[in-house]
Image (spheres, rainbow, N blue to C red):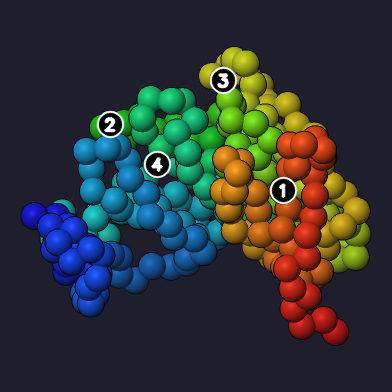
C-alpha cells in the first residue's frame, strides 16, 4: 500500500485525516558540489514523486527518482544544463497530462553584477517516459535582467497559461530602481513561437524582490510577494480589470 510519512492512505481515510506522522531519512545524493533549488516533481502520472534539484554554478538540472524506488543514492537523470539557473515552476504547458518545467537562468555573477543580457525564461518540454534518453527540449519565453522568481498559473483568465516574472532588482548595478513585474501569456503557436507576448504590469511599487508564494482565490491565481516593502498581495481584479496591491505586513523596515 502506498504510504505517506509512514501512514497508509487507507489509515488516513479511516481516521478522517487524523494521524501522527513519522519521518525517515534517506540519502538522495552525496558529495554534491553546489546546490540552490530543490522541488518535488512527478514526471508522469504513473511515476512516484521525485525531486528536481540544481545549483547555480554547475547548472545541471537533474531529476532524482523517489528514494523508495532505487537503492543507489545520486542515481539522477540530467534533463538540461543551463548557465546559472535560478528559480523554476512547473505546469502541464502542453496539455498532455505531464508537468513541464519553467525555469529562468543566465543570472550573472551577483545580484548587483547581474547579466544585462540574461534573466532568460524557458520552458522544458517533458518527454514522458523517455526522460533519460536525451535532454529536454527548450522553448524560449522571454527575458528580463536579474530574473529571480517566476510563477506559472492563470492570473487574469483561465484559458491559457500565464507566467509572472519577478527580477530581484530593477537594473544591473542598481539596488534602488523599482522592479518590473512581467506577465507572459501563452502564444497561439505554443511549439513554434519565438517568444511569449508580454506586458509589464507594474514598474513603480516593488524593490528588491526576494520571494513569492502563489495563491488561488476566486478561481484566479495571485501572488504574495516578499520585497523591501514587506509582504504584499498582488492580484488581478476582474471587475475593475486592473492589477491590485494590498499590503499584508511591513516586515522589519530600516
Q: Which residue is mark 1?
A: 235
- Residue 8 horizontal/vertical position (percent): 14, 61
* CA gap, disc 4 and disc 3: 21 Å
* CA gap, disc 2 and disc 1: 38 Å
Q: Residue at x 48, y 38 (%)?
A: 91
* Vertical comparison of 220 with 173: above or below: above
Callout 3: SS: loop
* CA gap, disc 3 and disc 1: 25 Å
Q: Which residue is mark 2?
A: 130
- Residue 212 horizontal/vertical position (percent): 64, 59
Q: Residue at x 30, y 37 (%)?
A: 44
Compared across the picture, whether 232 is left or right of 223 comes to: right
- Residue situated in front as seen by the camera: 159 or 137: 159
Nearer the N terminus, badge 3 or badge 2? 2
Report if residue 114 is visible in the image. Answer: no
Q: Residue at x 33, y 45 (%)?
A: 42
Q: Which mark is residue 99?
A: none
The reply to whether the C-beta atoms of the residues labelled 2 and 1 are less than 8 Å apart is no
Q: Residue at x 65, y 40 (%)?
A: 155
Select label 3 or label 2 by which is in front. Answer: 3
Callout 2: SS: helix
Q: Kindly indicate the quadrant of the structure image that contains residue 79.
A: top left
Select label 4 or label 3 by which is in front. Answer: 3
Select label 2 or label 1 by which is in front. Answer: 1
Amino acid at each position: 500500500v502506498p504510504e505517506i510519512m509512514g501512514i497508509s492512505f487507507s489509515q488516513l481515510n479511516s481516521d478522517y485525516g487524523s494521524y501522527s506522522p513519522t519521518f525517515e531519512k534517506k540519502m538522495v545524493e552525496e558529495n554534491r558540489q553546489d546546490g540552490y533549488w530543490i522541488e518535488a516533481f512527478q514526471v508522469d502520472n504513473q511515476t512516484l514523486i521525485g525531486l528536481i534539484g540544481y545549483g547555480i554554478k554547475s547548472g545541471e538540472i537533474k531529476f532524482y527518482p523517489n528514494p523508495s524506488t532505487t537503492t543507489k543514492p545520486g542515481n539522477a537523470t540530467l534533463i538540461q544544463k543551463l548557465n546559472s539557473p535560478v528559480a523554476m515552476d512547473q505546469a502541464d504547458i502542453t496539455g498532455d497530462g505531464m508537468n513541464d518545467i519553467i525555469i529562468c537562468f543566465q543570472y550573472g555573477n551577483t545580484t548587483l553584477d547581474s547579466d544585462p543580457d540574461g534573466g532568460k525564461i524557458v520552458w522544458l518540454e517533458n518527454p514522458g517516459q523517455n526522460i533519460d534518453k536525451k535532454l529536454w527540449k527548450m522553448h524560449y519565453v522571454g527575458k528580463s535582467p536579474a530574473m529571480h522568481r517566476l510563477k506559472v498559473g492563470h492570473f487574469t483568465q483561465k484559458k491559457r497559461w500565464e507566467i509572472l516574472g519577478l527580477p530581484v532588482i530593477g537594473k544591473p548595478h542598481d539596488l534602488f530602481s523599482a522592479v518590473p513585474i512581467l506577465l507572459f501569456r501563452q502564444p497561439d503557436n505554443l511549439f513554434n513561437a519565438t517568444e511569449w507576448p508580454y506586458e509589464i504590469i507594474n514598474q513603480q511599487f516593488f524593490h528588491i524582490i526576494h520571494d513569492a508564494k502563489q495563491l488561488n482565490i476566486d478561481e484566479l491565481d495571485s501572488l504574495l510577494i516578499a520585497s523591501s516593502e514587506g509582504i504584499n498581495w498582488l492580484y488581478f481584479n476582474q471587475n475593475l480589470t486592473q492589477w491590485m496591491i494590498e499590503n499584508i505586513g511591513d516586515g522589519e523596515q530600516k
